[in-house]
Image (cartoon, grey):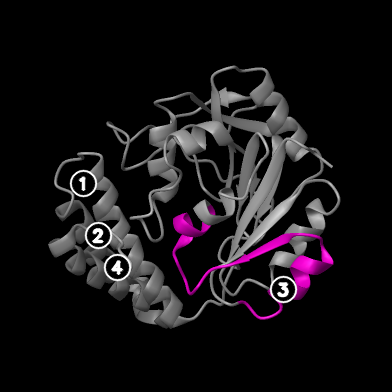
Amino acid sequence: MSNNTTIVTVSFNSSTVIRELLESVRGETPCIVVDNGRSDGISALAAEFGADLLRNEGNQGFGRACNAGAALVKTEFIFFVNPDAVIAPGCIDALEEAARQRPDFAAANPRVVDAEGRSKFKTTSILLPDGGTRAPLPQTTTQVPVLSGCALFVRRSLFEAVGGFDPAIFLYHEDHDLAVRLSQHGSLWCVPEALVRHLQGTGASRTAQLAWFKGYHMARSRHFVLKKHARPMPFLRTLFPAFGELLLPHNLFSTRRRSRSLGQLMGALSSLGDHGGYKTK
């Protein structure tokens, strides 16, 4: 078992998919499961695979749930991994080795592929001054300007130094916000020798209601991070994409897509008054 890394994963009704993740790391790396939605069967799964279970009172959002799990971590590194992912053998070893070789290492993504083996690599972000430029997946460990949250390996001391994920972001864009803040303290990397398979969209049931919920918070978070990082015209840059998405022809033939687009539009309009920040009672 690695004494250097702890996995933190957030379950929002994800008990049907999280088994593969837990199986992929059983006996190798300690794991903390943060239950963000009272998932059926999650207690038994955590016990079966020796994972620690932390239950939130209701859905606290992705970033807050990650922070709650990270608060329990004592190892040098934290590996935030989506519940609908599988960690390949040697992945964590490769990430730890990349960190050991670079004293200024802050965080990294492994190579992430979908169920068909297609790489998912992104170097653009609405938070980068020029939006970033598209680049192919590197063949060796390479410095990058931004990171994805689906499989995010981070030095715990720096994660704590920047305050973790911003609790004012409920869902979406919290990974890029964190990456920008981490880059002020160290370097960001892609480590293609490390591999994670991500079955995107299977972490929770795919219903029209959930699609609206995700679209709503996607727009609100977009407005929030654009304003936080002083990007120009944050509200208009939130409203126009939401409105444009609603007009796309393919939305006419999918209730779920149409619900997501309506959620985005409603989220954008709701953010006009409070800039999209998430608050709890």
Measuring 16% from the left and 55% from the top, which residue is drawn there? Answer: 235
Residue 111's x, y, as percent?
A: 64, 39
Q: Which residue is mark 2?
A: 276
Q: Which residue is mark 1?
A: 227
Q: CA distance from mark 2 to mark 4?
A: 12 Å
Q: Is residue 222 on the magenta stretch?
A: no
The earlier-in-sequence mark between 1 and 3 is 3
Q: Which residue is mark 4?
A: 264
Classify 134 as above or below 247: above
Q: CA distance from mark 3 to mark 2?
A: 33 Å
Residue 218's x, y, as percent?
A: 35, 61
Horizontally, is 223 left or right of 280 in the view?
left
Measuring 79% from the left and 51% from the top, which residue is drawn there? Answer: 25
User: Of discs 1 and 3, which sits in the foreground?
Assistant: 3
Q: CA distance from mark 4 to mark 1?
A: 17 Å
Quadrant the C terminus occupies: bottom left
Magenta part of the chain: 39-66
Horizontally, is 2 left or right of 160 in the view?
right
Amino acid residing under circle 3:
Ser
The earlier-in-sequence mark between 4 and 1 is 1
SS of the residue under disc 4: helix
Classify 191 as above or below 68: above
Picture quadrant of residue 236: bottom left
Horizontally, is 226 left or right of 58 in the view?
left
User: Of discs 3 and 2, which sits in the foreground?
Assistant: 3
Relative to the observer, which residue lies in front, 200 or 257?
200
